[in-house]
Image (cartoon, helix red, strand yellow):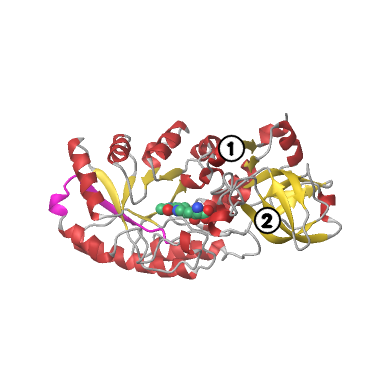
Amino acid sequence: MALVGSFFKYKNGTLTIEEIALKRIAEKTRTPVYIYSQKAILQTLSMLKKALSGVELFICYAVKANANPTLLELFAKQGIGADIVSGGELKQVMHSGMRTSGIVFSGVGKMEHEIRAALEKNIYAFHVESEEELFVINDIAKSSNKKASIAFRWNPDVDAKTHRYIATGLKKNKFGLNKSEIFSLLKKRNQLKYVDFKGVSIHIGSQIITLKPFQEAFYKTQTLILEIQSMLAKKLSFVSLGGGLGITYKNEKPFPLKEYGKLILKLFGPASKTPLKVILEPGRFLVGNAGVLLTKVLYRKKRKEKDFLILDAGMNDLLRPALYQSYHEILPLDEALLKGKYKKTDLVGPVCESSDFFALGRLFPTGVNRGDYLAVFSAGAYGYSMGSQYNLRPRPVEVWVTKDARAS
Ligand code: LLP
């Protein structure tokens, strides 16, 4: 059976990752538990790098997708940087041993103390999202006697064709500056002596599965860069093309990565009109399908029209279905349970909210009952990181499967 992401496999009747039975992990720890595969992450990272060969690439992993310390250490060892959005993420990244010179700071609401801390650590660049923010950065840099490297985060007004909550590149969204704001700031550059205009950044949205929105946004970005360069009479040093690469949750078929790489090479590669260092800020793509959430069935509530399976994981552990009505594949660890009858089932959590569900009206095997373990797939990104302790529930455990772990 082909499973989402194909890193997790049934072997000898039980769901495994890197040859390890997930059930063993659940029994050794507790549920709910997030399980991540290092091998899956490294494979995905190398696929991305390969697709972009020829481009002067620097990957800044979007920490918000999953800020697990072991993951950040792994990325630090791989020499990649980080895209952060808060002082908390800055601290977490620094603990991982990542070089602060590989950090970009995004987000519409950077606070003064966060800007000061990032400046002190000499991060690579601030992605500026408003006129006021740029002046605040300039003032802070002045008082610290430093020059802050910045990129204009611009909003290209492109429809990413994704869930409206995770589209960020439309005029109506709060993100980024528009063209006229950027040029008005450039005209005020005499008052902005403590910032260095180094680049342009965009991020049009998340879980994008067709190339077209990227094409449209990247072409527009090239035009903008040419215009900025001619106004400043100097070359910019980088373009940050954001994250947004979509993954398969159900049966989505994202565009071939090769096409994405070709597009970037054409527009920003060494032989292009705008040869620049290219920063990418992938989050979901690198970790989404490398993680599952394991949960145990607490109760089956039988009803005529549909049953309820009540799980020990809830919306506080994985918020995506409640917030975006997003689909996550759910399978029992014991393959034999897939046989037999299926019935319409709501798979729900123990939290006191009707939006506390993982699947509604899904055809699910009637053989799955109290005490059985289930894996909720594609939970590596925006899973644990968006969790809370709502209902005063403890946070789930996180377990890493690495080659070394196999020996134990
Ligand atoms: N760069 C910036 C500036 C971002 O705002 C984001 C994500 C990324 C990069 C990484 O995007 P990715 O490669 O993961 O698509 N909670 C939502 C996703 C929110 C994404 C927010 N920004 C979800 O669970 O689908």
Whole-percent x and y of residue 101? 36, 39
Relative placement, left or right, of 238 versus 389 is left
Mark in the foreground, 1 or 2: 1
Looking at the image, tell me whether mark 1 or mark 2 is earlier in sequence order: 2
Per the image, the residue denoted by label 1 is 393
Residue type, mark 1 in image: Arg
- Between 54 and 323, which is closer to the camera in this rendering? 323
Q: How much space separates mark 1 and mark 2, taking CA atoms? A: 24 Å
Q: Which residue is mark 2?
A: 329
- Identify the secondary structure beneath mark 2: loop
Q: Amino acid at mark 2?
A: Glu
Where does the image place residue 392, in percent across and percent down from the top left? 55, 37
Residue at image coords 63%, 37% = 400
Quarter occupied by residue 92: top left
Residue 195 belongs to the span the image colors magenta: yes
**Extent of the magenta region:** 189-204
Position of 329 relative to 299 (above/below): below
At x 48%, y 40%, the residue is: 79
Which is nearer the eye, 219 or 343? 343
